């Protein structure tokens, strides 16, 4: 026992519910959540994703219904990802720049129906290419940086013109944040935010997402020449510093729970809005544990989301957003 015992008993403040709530160092609310949604073609379409139990692709009418649901729950922002039809996928991913593509139509539909909700849009070419990479590929199979960055600028402008509130480049090309920021400013989109996927790791946790956007079978090789090595932490700080210097309004660490140390270091070093993506593999692990009777979904969802807040996150992209919001609003 310490010399101060029993004068100091840390359990005193834990003894009752009201006191635990009063002394909580971090608070989780629906306003901390961003809900990723998958968009597909058609009308009245809901396509369940087998590797993401409880998650579906939705046609535009379903996406609008999810936007209304999110607004009612107090979720402030949606993140959109398209399931581009196979006949529109090309080596150069040019469908990403089509002002009437699936992503742009989804943006407009949400903004027309639920204008008060934020829309975050992914900037990368992988949902639009035949090879499944985030950028343009040369004859040797290498994802080239500068010409990819030029294509991403046009993709970002296309989304901003459609009404996107937050441009979120997830490609990990060097220099693309500065180019996109300059292009947005030049076209007058001064209030369109950039949330940079600043520390995105080449991870084993992305598999179900690739099922959701139908790229798993397309990917030739891997993404290790442009996404980060899981062994590296100092490099993440360099990536974040560059993206902030180029004009990012906020930064993201991806995946989430395996990289809580990176989140904490980014927040401590830069003191900027820092987000995490609780990615598809993390979601699937929770749902698999629940299905096996090994975990309580409600408790596990809230505990993992609180872990992000405790690590320093301003918010979290999570497929459990609607479920968590209902729990928090109860």
Image (tube, grey):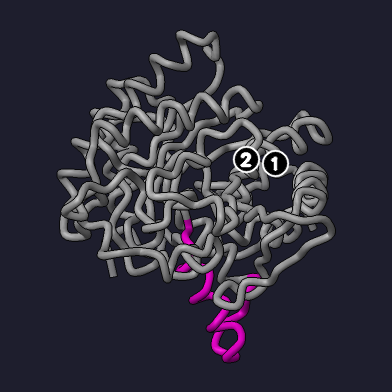
Report the residue marked by disc 1: 106
Q: Identify which residue, 178 or 159, lies in the foreground.
A: 159
* Residue at x 45%, y 27% (from the top left corner): 154
Task: In the displayed orientation, state which residue is furthest to the bottom.
Answer: 292
Judge from the rendering whether residue 68 lies leftward or rightward of residue 234; answer left or right.
right
Residue 223 x, y percent position in the rendering: 27, 57
| Residue 203 higher or lower than 64, as above or below | below
Asked if the stretch drawn in magenta spans residue 19, the answer is no
The answer to whether residue 33 of the structure is visible from this angle is no
Disc tally is 2
Q: Identify which residue, 67 or 285, lies in the foreground.
A: 67
* Residue at x 59%, y 44% (from the top left corner): 32
Report the residue marked by disc 2: 101
Segment colored magenta: 278-298
| Residue 150 higher or lower than 148, as above or below | above
The answer to whether the residues at label 1 and label 2 have Cβ atoms under 8 Å apart is no
> Which of the two discs, 1 and 2, labels the residue nearer the N terminus?
2
The answer to whether residue 82 of the structure is visible from this angle is yes
Q: Identify which residue, 152 or 139, lies in the foreground.
A: 139
């Amino acid at each position: 026992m310490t010399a101060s015992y029993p004068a100091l008993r840390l359990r005193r403040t834990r003894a009752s519910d009201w006191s635990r709530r009063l002394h909580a160092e971090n608070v989780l609310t629906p306003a901390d959540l961003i809900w990723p949604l998958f968009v597909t073609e058609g009308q009245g379409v809901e396509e369940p994703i087998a590797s993401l139990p409880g998650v579906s692709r939705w046609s535009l009418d379903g996406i609008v219904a999810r936007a209304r649901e999110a607004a009612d729950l107090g979720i402030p922002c949606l993140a959109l990802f398209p399931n581009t039809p196979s006949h529109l996928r090309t080596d150069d991913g040019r469908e990403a720049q089509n002002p009437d593509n699936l992503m742009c139509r989804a943006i407009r539909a949400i903004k027309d129906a639920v204008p008060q909700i934020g829309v975050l849009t992914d900037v990368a070419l992988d949902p639009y290419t035949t090879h499944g990479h985030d950028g343009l590929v040369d004859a040797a199979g290498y994802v080239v940086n500068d010409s990819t960055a030029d294509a991403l600028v046009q993709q970002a402008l296309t989304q901003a013109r459609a009404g996107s509130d937050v441009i979120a480049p997830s490609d990990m090309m060097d220099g693309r944040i500065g180019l996109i920021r300059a292009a947005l400013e030049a076209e007058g989109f001064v209030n369109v935010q950039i949330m940079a996927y600043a520390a995105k790791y080449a991870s084993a946790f992305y598999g179900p997402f690739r099922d959701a956007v139908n790229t798993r079978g397309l990917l030739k090789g891997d993404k290790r020449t442009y996404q980060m090595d899981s062994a590296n932490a100092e490099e993440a700080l360099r990536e974040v510093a560059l993206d902030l210097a180029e004009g990012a309004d906020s930064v993201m660490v991806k995946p989430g729970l395996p990289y809580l140390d990176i989140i904490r270091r980014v927040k401590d070093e830069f003191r900027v809005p820092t987000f995490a993506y609780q990615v598809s593999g993390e979601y699937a692990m929770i749902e698999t544990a629940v299905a096996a009777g090994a975990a309580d979904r409600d408790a596990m969802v809230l505990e993992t989301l609180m872990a992000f807040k405790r690590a320093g996150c301003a918010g979290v992209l999570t497929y459990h957003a609607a479920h968590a919001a209902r729990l928090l609003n109860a």
